[in-house]
Amino acid sequence: MEQITSELLITRLADWGVDTVFGIPGDGINGIMEGLRRHSDRVRFFLVHHEEAAAFMATGYAKATGRLGVCLATSGPGGVHLANGLYDAAMDHTPVLAITGMQETAVLGTGYQQEVHLDRLYADVSVYNQVVVNPEQLPTLVDLAIRTAFARRGVAHLSIPNDIQIAPATAQPYQHVAPVRAPKSAAVYFGPPARPRDEDLRAAAEVLNAGQKVTILAGIGARGAGRLVEQLAETLDAPVIKTLNGKMVIADDSPYTTGGLGLLGTGPSEELVEDTDTLVMLGTNFPYTKFLPPAGTTKVVQVEIDPTRAGVRLPTDVPLIGDVSATLEALLPMLTARVGHGRLGDYGARMREWRERLTALETPERDPIAPQYLARLLDELAADDAVLTCDSGTIATWAARHWQIRGDREFYLSGNLATMAPGLPYAIAIQHAYPGRQVISYQGDGGFAMLMAEFRTAAQYQLPIKVVINNNNSLGQILWEQMVLGYPEHGVRYGEPKPAFAEWARGCGGFAARIDRPGDLEGALREALAHPGPALVDVAVDPNEPPMPGKISYEQAKKFGQSFMRGQPHKVSIATTLFKDRIQQMRDY
């Protein structure tokens, strides 16, 4: 059988180590599907129910494995559907290759059916973006796309017209008029040097040795460097704040950390920022500058692999361009160890008090079920190497504060795009990559409803993911954001009828339970976690439980009060919940 151009694409993906392509077939990619069929022994096509989910799966797969994530969609609407998941990859600096179809070249520009120029649509989201117009361009364009995705930590896109897909792989349709041959390349990528220059390391050491109140802010770029981060903290008597994306850099019970920062963070972290004269930023481009020290009030040393991101949030005294692990290994011998650990001891005590306050809210005595109790039970019952994928919304607050990183646990969510709905696709892709690990998708009802069809995907592939729905029957984060602006909530509660998520999961062949009483929750979670296949537990939680910030400012309290005075429709229920929270915390002291 004559080899077609699509086979050059698929075999080159395999040469790069790609073993899975997430997507949905369509008439704009039938040639590519044939290439996948002919080489299914090397690259597996993973069929999903929505192209957005395919892009999320590619992103989650890449985040968890460090390998390239690949998604495939047909021309026109299929490619349009990929966009949100691709932006998630782009904004979290994740290497993903998107492959799309396009109408055959003879009709381009005529307004043919589904003629969407996806290369133009993806111009903003991609770091490499090409339309293949000649079979001779492959496999070189595959090599360039993948190298660029890794080098620039982003999305690469190849769009291949129908007629090119099925053209003979050896076709040379045009005469070469320039002094060139068809391009030839190799499936090889070598990353840039990861160690900063010696003079920059010495300058950073001088700043850090002079600092009296040093604080570390660690992001996802410090993943894998946890031991070195703790060694830096020990040397400089510097507590460690973790960004939400960087939650798994060091354990949550580490004596060096004060947890997260910002609206989802801890009170001690906010106090720590106010008590800082030198800030060390490790692998983070933390966007919420309101929670960082005001510009000019602190010395800043930033370790960042991308020089364009160094100094974006704060003026940086010494930018160290390099990998966090390699940088710290070179920097630590240059630092002078502090005598005593006053700051670590002080903020360790504050964190113990903070945890006691959180524990007081994790009570099974509340009815409706407190979301904090659900999160605490999930944390207690999950394995020490479990992977938790999370959606955006109030669910992220409960995960940030009550899901504890310990052992080999991992945690993934849409960090910078903060989109709803990636939790379930992430879990499916990560379970596919790591079939022996426990993978839990912790979602709100809003996010789950968007891509709930993918639970059937998990069942089809017999992936034993566990889905736990924090169901407040509302868009809870938006509700509280409206109130903090001083406005009564509007258009955020779904009302009746309530969707039967558990029935859907059972219809797909999975285990399912709907829980609305605290006493039934632990047993249901245990049963779901022990189930050998996909399982779902839909938990009705208190819809009036607010995700309070680590420290409440006067302005926030004033705006919250204004929303009550302006006609907040559920003010009695919300006030009652807040009162119960306070009483519970006072009782447990």
Image (spheres, rainbow, N blue to C red):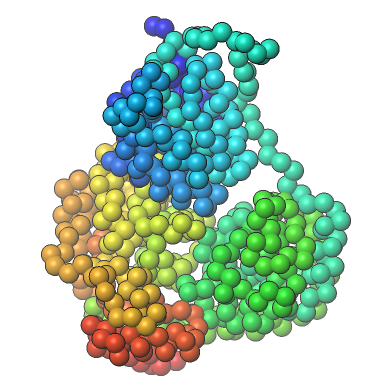
**Does residue 139 sit above or below 360 in this rendering?**
above
Residue 147 horizontal/vertical position (percent): 60, 34
Can residue 315 be seen here? The reply is yes
Of the pair 40 and 35, the residue shown nearer to us: 35
Residue 495 horizontal/vertical position (percent): 17, 69
Which of the 4 image quadrants contains residue 213? bottom right
Give the side of residue 76 with respect to residue 285, left or right: left
Which of the 4 image quadrants contains residue 399? bottom left
- Residue at the image position 38 percent from the left and 52 percent from the top: 422
Give the side of residue 32 with respect to residue 8, left or right: left
Residue 21 horizontal/vertical position (percent): 41, 33
- Residue at the image position 20 percent from the left and 45 percent from the top: 509
Q: Residue furthest front?
A: 110
- Residue at the image position 16 percent from the left and 59 percent from the top: 500
Of the pair 62 and 372, the residue shown nearer to us: 62
**Does residue 345 sit above or below 188 in this rendering?**
below
The N terminus - image quarter: top left
Q: Residue furthest left?
A: 497
Can residue 33 be seen here? The reply is no
The C terminus - image quarter: bottom left
> How many numbered dots are placed on residues in this image?
0
Residue 189 horizontal/vertical position (percent): 64, 33
Of the pair 260 and 446, the residue shown nearer to us: 446
**Does residue 332 sit above or below 94 in this rendering?**
below
Give the side of residue 380 with respect to residue 501, left or right: right
Of the pair 91 and 335, the residue shown nearer to us: 91
- Residue at the image position 84 percent from the left and 63 percent from the top: 203
**Does residue 453 sit above or below 35 in this rendering?**
below
